[in-house]
Amino acid sequence: MKNHVIINNKINSFNNKIYVSGDKSISIRCVLLASQGIGLSKIYNLLESEDVLNSLKSIKKLGIEYEKKSSHYLIKGFGLSGFKTNKKINLNAGNSGTFARLILGLLVDSKNEIKILGDKSLSIRDFSRVTEPLKQFGATINSNKNTLPVKIIGTDFLRPINYEEKLGSAQCKSAVILAAIKTPGTTKIKARKSRNHTELLLKNLGFPIKVMRKKNFDLIEVHGQNNFRGFEYTVPGDISSSAFFLVLTLLSKESKLKIMNVNVNKSRTGIIKILNMMNANIQLKKTKIYKGEAVSDIYVKSKNNLKSIKCPQELNSSAIDEFLLIFLVAAKSRGISSFKNLSELNKKESPRLDIAVNFLRKIGVKVIRNKDDIKIYGNSKLELKGKFIMNNFKKDHRVFMMSCVAALTLGGKWKIHDKDSINSSFPKFLKLIKKLGAKIN
């Protein structure tokens, strides 16, 4: 079966409503925390992507039972000491940096060696940002030059730590939090602002975690070794998946879209703030708080007078997964847009900043780059003709989906490789975009 798509026509105007798949970050965290609860957890709308399914397969290897029902997943945990790690085990994280890093936090008390493996893309990403603080708890961790595979052997003598997270990485912060829930005493964390799903889930479970929110960082205290019971949770829609449809609508002619029941946690909505600063009109309606998380219906309509932006750096972390799309909007906007301090983009599934610059130049957009800063010279009349081939982007799912959005809104004849990449995060992407009228072969 071919592993590419052909797009030869722009999408026609549409007016519709859609539901996107469940939030990946929350889905993985629900699986991990359910594995630590006592008794059954019932999780609805769990994202059925390769990343999440690999998480389920891995906890099963660790002795946790799960079952898929027609409308939900059941996961049976045995408490904070419930993993069976009395033999050497290999866990395959696939493409998921979130799972690979967070599971290490839960293995700081493992009895035998556990090896974490990943695919080619994940195996070149830095793990020292997680392994170094986890060693301070007392775990023994060895790696391949700070990349996967990583081997961990836990300890019976865990000790709480004081940790400062300086990168704005929710994965690093969450790995330490998950190690802390297994550790006697109080672990203290000073963390730059990043997504806070782990903290909200633990608070909802009644776990003794305290968060003091400051302007630029959070102070977190975790009081460890307190068991909690299994839980019920309905995963809201993923804002990162929604972002592709926000930009598709924004750059299409005379189109409107409502995306239903989406997680709009403030640590994740940087793209909405940035696009509205660029003269979009994206509205959140019927907002409610579900177990600590803000959930809304998102309304967006097309705009033909988008303007450039000097993007505030404080929004970087809350839009880090969406910058490929933001750059695309900047290319179609009036004026020069500037973005600074985007080094974290090159530490994702692929070197996204490098790929974005090359992509924009490929479609005729002037870009000036200075290390981790870029300027994009926008053109509100940008229309593409000719043929474009997208390949060699390390099978990054977000590059594939962004390329589809570009083809459907800017024109040209496109061949976009590595269709299978979307299986890691958003398997229903092509089906959903075709529902809106996209012609994709």
Image (cartoon, rainbow, N blue to C red):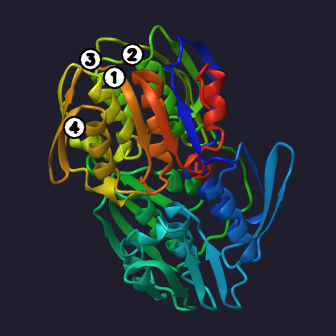
As helix, strand or loop, the secondary structure at mark 3 comes to loop
How many neighbours does mark 2 have within 10 angstroms: few (below 14), some (14-19), or many (20 or more)? some
**Residue linked to disc 3:** 380
Q: Residue at x 51, y 25 (%)?
A: 8
Q: Is residue 111 depicted above or below 420 in this figure?
A: below
Sequence order check, earlier mark of 1 and 4: 1
Which residue is painted at 29% across and 37% down in the image? 360
Question: CA gap, disc 3 to disc 2?
Answer: 17 Å
- Dot 4: within a 10 Å radius of its alpha carbon, few (fewer than 14), some, or many (20 or more) residues? few
N-term-proximal mark, 2 vs 1 = 1
Mark drawn on residue 149? none
Residue 276 is marked as 1
Q: Disc 3 or disc 1, which is closer to the eye? A: 3
Indicate the position of residue 421 as horizontal and vertical percent values: 56, 51
Label whose residue precedes the other's in the sequence (3 or 1)? 1
> Hey, which residue is sitting farthest top in the picture?
254
Badge 2 marks a residue whose secondary structure is loop
Asked whether disc 3 touches disc 4, contact meaning CB atoms under 8 Å apart, the reply is: no
Depth check, front residue: 353 or 99: 353
Query: Is mark 3 in CB contact (under 8 Å) with mark 1?
Result: no
User: Tag 3: Cα neighbours inside 10 Å, few (<14), some, or many (≥20)?
Assistant: some
Rounded to the nearest angstrom, the CA distance separating label 1 from label 4 is 13 Å
The relative height of residue 255 versus residue 21 in the rendered view (above or below) is: above
Q: Which of the labelled discs sits on residue 281, or is there none?
A: 2
Kindly report the distance in space between the C-alpha atoms of the residues bearing marks 3 and 4: 22 Å
Q: For the residue marked with disc 3, what is the amino acid?
A: Ser
Task: Give amino acid for label 1.
Answer: Asn
* Residue receiving disc 4: 312
Which residue is depicted at the point 52% across and 13% down? 256
Question: Mark 2 and 4 residues: CB-CB less than 8 Å, in contact?
Answer: no
Lower sequence index among marks 3 and 4: 4
